[in-house]
Amino acid sequence: MTDTILSPHPWNLETRPDGSASPEALDAWVQAKLARHRAAIERLLAEKGPRTVENTLRPYDDAVAELSATATQTGLLDSVHPQKEIRDRAQALAQVISQAGVELGLNQAVYQALNEVDPESADPATQHYLKRTLLQYRLAGVDKDEATRTRLRELQDKATVQALAFGRNVQENVNTVVVENASELEGLPADYLAAHQPGEDGKIILTTDYPDYLPVMTFAKSSELRRRMYLAYNTRAFPQNREVLLDLLKIRKEIASLLGFETWADLATADQMMGSATNMREFLEELDVASRAGAEKEFAMIAEFARVEQKAESNDAEIDAASRGYWLEQYRRSAFEFDSQSVRPYFPYDRVEQGVLSTASRLFQVEFRKVENASVWHPDVVTYDIIDRDTQVGRFYLDMHPREGKDKWFSAHPLIPGIVDHPDGRQIPEAALICNFPGGKEGDPGLMLHSDVVTYFHEFGHLLHALLGGHQSWAGLSGIATEGDFVEVPSQMLEEFFRDPRLLATFALHYETNEPIPAELVLRMNRAGAFGRADWVRTQLFYTTYSLETHALDPETLDLDQLLYSLYARFLPYVWIDGNRMYASFGHLVGYSSNYYTYLYDKVIALDFFAQFARTNLLDDPVAMKYRRTVLEPGGSMPGEDIVLRFLGRRQSADAFVSWVGEEFQVTAAVYE
């Protein structure tokens, strides 16, 4: 290995004479990478002497490194490449790559070889890697008989096909809402109106892409428009994904049964910090009880406000699911003198990007250097190197605005696992952010909502974890390689920095006047933002419990719609809207499966971490470097509970979380005053 990756990126391959990318070149790239993967396994199995870390774990990890880089880069092309034929070929190849991963996970000879390695003389990270790898082998069924392993292999392949189909259906099925009369757009900001002009037929077409969807749900006065947009958004990939999801749940149920688990949720938590599905239920019940009274109080305040505003003659004025965001916004404007649109001029996309970079640079003492003329998959993509004391420690790509055929969500996407101390040299970690923020078009400053900026900080927290944690001796420990229910901690911790007025004043400058955002406006934003946190917890409990129950109930008799309705009624007070098929586009059911609880679980840890920072000196608090060294840089080299202990000196506490949820009802001013 060298300071560059082992082979060219798949978006930098030979092209056709017309300049378009070649699916055949992508095929060849994947096959070459898989050949290197197989060669590493053969090298491992050919060893005849006593099993050691270097002659067994090293070739195993080389195989993991090749497979990981192949999977992540091919998956990226499936999500973002502008040519549909490349996306299609990448999706087909992703199945082939996944099959190779299943084969490795069920390879008894490899498992036996790893099991014979004596870890006693190895460093703690290597011991952790071996222990976790052997556990994952057992959870994959490597110790089962041949017939069972064959069936597991078949089921895993089928699961991959269904998961890929689910994601592609969401990606390529963008719904639209037709606005016949421009008056329906009353309440929306001027730049939104300017970007959505009527066509020749006088109609305005809105999409369910986030930059179109979120402003309508937040600002549009027309309840009818909000309702149409709500249903359009929550019926994406329906009905296609209903059967895809049910088939996937049946496959997962059979896999869990073959491995000796009652449900998939029991299997999915077996190697997590949570430990078991029983522990998950207990955790969710605790948050249910803790958030119920606050959520009821919030809703009563909003409902009374809406009743008065609508001059309802009775107390029966109802707020439906499509109006939740709108009435939250209206209440915040009235109660806290804060209009979400008032901060948008201070958050043009380009300045937010530079603000996120400058914040991370100052906190963690690294430099971000823009890379000109880098090889990328689309002209809109921007590339940066991370420099630490004149040494490159990572590279990342920003693909931040929506376009046709691109994945419509927001995510950090690891691409290359960083490896140090390898006999052949060093491999630099690489990752990408795939987002769909406003802007990206000539003349559009991309004015962002404060929630958009929070999302940017959140995703950048993932990116830093992938890159600063990407300097391990083993690819299998590199970057975001912790337990699945620790991965959201760095992202949720970093988003808390967005509330500091001094920090925001360093980059939040009015896009026309260049004036910094007033501290008083930020404080009002913070007070307004604190309102509705119990409602947010209830919403997360709704999503989390749905992800759990879909994987705990019998998929043969599961009614996805009835379950959705019953859990909505249990956790949320807003009137249900018939026709909601949210599950058809709920991608976390594929990625997180039953473990969506990690967002709430990690919020508890993240807020406990953030509480260690000095609120009066966030940008220059030495705790930031302690956080970098003890939380980000370990990557997956130790259990998540050990990372918590290293940073806090104790196990996590829910005290900061409880205080955060209740902040809206505190009489005192925001904590940042």
Image (cartoon, helix red, strand yellow):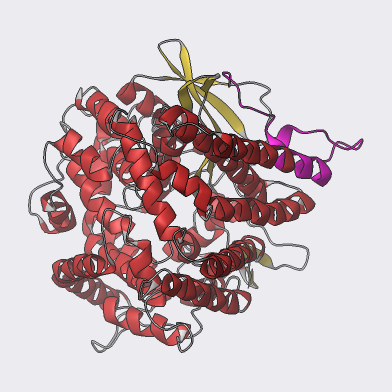
Question: Residue shown at 58%/44% (left/top)?
Answer: 72
Q: Nearer the viewer, residue 436 or 10?
A: 10
Residue 673 seen:
no
* Predominant secondary structure, magenta span: loop
Residue 260, picture quadrant: bottom left
In the foreground, 402 or 244: 244
Residue 464 falls in which quadrant of the image? Answer: top left
Q: Percent position (x, y) of residue 542?
A: 33, 72
Q: Is residue 16 in the magenta section?
A: yes
Magenta extent: 1-30
Q: Of residues 504 and 278, which is closer to you in this image?
A: 278
Q: Where is residue 549 in the image (x, y as percent from the top left)?
A: 36, 76
Q: In this view, does 248 lie to the left or right of 260?
A: right
Q: Tell me if residue 438 is in the magenta stretch.
A: no
Instruction: Locate the C terminus and report the quarter of the image it occupies.
Output: top left
Q: In this view, does 399 lie to the left or right of 272?
A: right
**Against 164, is 344 above or below?**
above
Residue at the left extreme, as displayed: 667
Task: Estimate the x, y position of residue 459 in percent, counting from the top left.
Answer: 43, 43
